[in-house]
Amino acid sequence: MDFTLSDEDRQLRDSVRDFVEDVVNPIWPEIERTDRLPQNVIDTAKELGLFGLAISPDYGGLGLSVVQKAVVHEMLGRGPWGLASYISVHTGIGCTGINLFGTPEQKERYLPKMASGEWLGSFGLTEPNAGSDASSLETRAERDGDHWVLNGRKIFITNAPYAHHVLIFAKAPKGITAFIVDTDTPGFAIGQVFDTLGHKGSAICELVIEDCRIPAGQLVGVEGKGFDIAKRVLSEGRTMLASRAVGSGQKAMELAIEHGESRKTFGKPLLDHQALAFRLAQMSARTEAGRLLAYRSAWLLDRGSPAIRESSTAKYFCGEGLWQTVDDAIQMLGGYGYIKGEYMIERIWRDSRVVRVYDGSSEVQQILIAQRLRKGDVETAW
Ligand SMILES: Cc1cc2nc3c(=O)[nH]c(=O)nc-3n(C[C@H](O)[C@H](O)[C@H](O)COP(=O)(O)OP(=O)(O)OC[C@H]3O[C@@H](n4cnc5c(N)ncnc54)[C@H](O)[C@@H]3O)c2cc1C
């Protein structure tokens, strides 16, 4: 078995890591204070091609494999989650639907401007009465001549306040269907924008959709098959979140090592105390195991597998593992770990809490894993 990254992948990893460590991490307190991503950060991300990770070079993107995207997301995880979320929702769940299932006309219209970062994408599945049980969504789509008319509410939609368009899921006569809705369409409005515990710099909001008429050509895929699109998009999204969690866990561990080597108690560095050295070893074991799960899921997706159980397993394990690792790191920093705005670990703690909630909570991942196991999918074929 060969775990070597190619030279090209190593270069990709190092350039994103340098961007996060040299450009973004030094200004994380400013992002927290202003709740905005500075323009130079967005511009540098654009120059690196991060807005077009999966989009084919034919449309101006980088055309990365899923494994390569996982490499990028792991590096983004080392920095503020507001930036990771801004980029990842745009290039991931905001883009994959059009990239994989869009018509040639839709790809021609949306992908080049998404790849350059001129148009920001977003993904609207969750509703006030349909979160974990997303298939019970209530937004309706009625056909009217050459148009569809949409009515409903969405909630917690990342990027939507800044987005050019949202992939909206609505119930049409034949079932759940995906539509691209431009945010300047009459009848489409941004409702409440929520203040959140973390993720500063990216915004989540409510969408109010009232008699919103969109051309029939905005339907993505096939009427009634929208939930299959959502599931495919989300299984990749889960793998990316798992990778991001691995990057954050790694960063938290490195912060713990730095503090544990320099801080002395009872006449010696913290890490000379065996109890804390064991804690560090556990952080490392969790992070390494999560990394393997995340990359295996990405590798399977590249080979055309839906990787439903594997992506859920990766997200569940990496999300829960990260929470424990960040808590361990805060414990290592003692009182300093609890100080706001000065030590990055408290930001990681606030940012990462939500990984156990969104894109399918830890409970939902366990439900999906158990369902797959009961259907006979008990072991991944190598
Ligand atoms: C920062 C942020 C960004 C988001 N971005 C987006 C986005 O871009 N697009 C989008 O569509 N959505 C987005 N969401 C929504 C997110 O995916 C949902 O919040 C998530 O799916 C959970 O749904 P809910 O909040 O309605 O919780 P609920 O479904 O009400 O669940 C509440 C709790 O009960 C648990 N639970 C529910 N059912 C069961 C069960 N059967 N067994 C055991 N436990 C159960 C859940 O795990 C959860 O802990 C975002 C949310 C946040 C916080």
Image: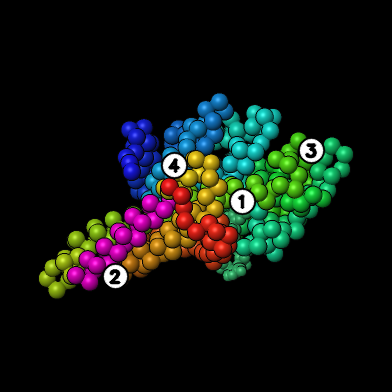
| Three-letter code for the amino acid on which mark 1 is drawn | Lys
The residue shown at (73%, 38%) is 218
Residue under label 1, please give it: 231
Residue behind label 1 places its C-beta within 8 angstroms of ligand 1: no
Residue under label 4, please give it: 67
Q: Position of residue 78 (x, y in %)?
A: 38, 50
Kindly give the residue lying farthest to the front in the view shown: 376
Magenta-colored stretch includes residue 282: yes
Circles 4 and 1: CB distance less than 8 Å? no
Compared to 85, does 215 lie above or below?
above
Say which of marks 3 and 4 sits in front. 4
Tell me the chief SS of the magenta region.
Answer: helix
The residue shown at (58%, 35%) is 114
| Three-letter code for the amino acid on which mark 2 is drawn | Gly
* Nearer the observer, 206 or 382: 382
Q: Position of residue 380 (x, y in %)?
A: 46, 52
The residue shown at (58%, 41%) is 96
Compared to 126, does 214 lie above or below?
above
Say which of marks 4 and 2 sits in front. 4
Residue under label 2, please give it: 334
Q: Write the start and end of the magenta stretch as one range.
A: 274-294
Q: SS of the residue at dot 3? A: helix
| Three-letter code for the amino acid on which mark 3 is drawn | Ala
Magenta-colored stretch includes residue 96: no
Residue under label 3, please give it: 216
Separation of residues labelled 2 and 3 (CA atoms): 58 Å
For ligand 1, the image quadrant comes to bottom right
Circles 2 and 3: CB distance less than 8 Å? no
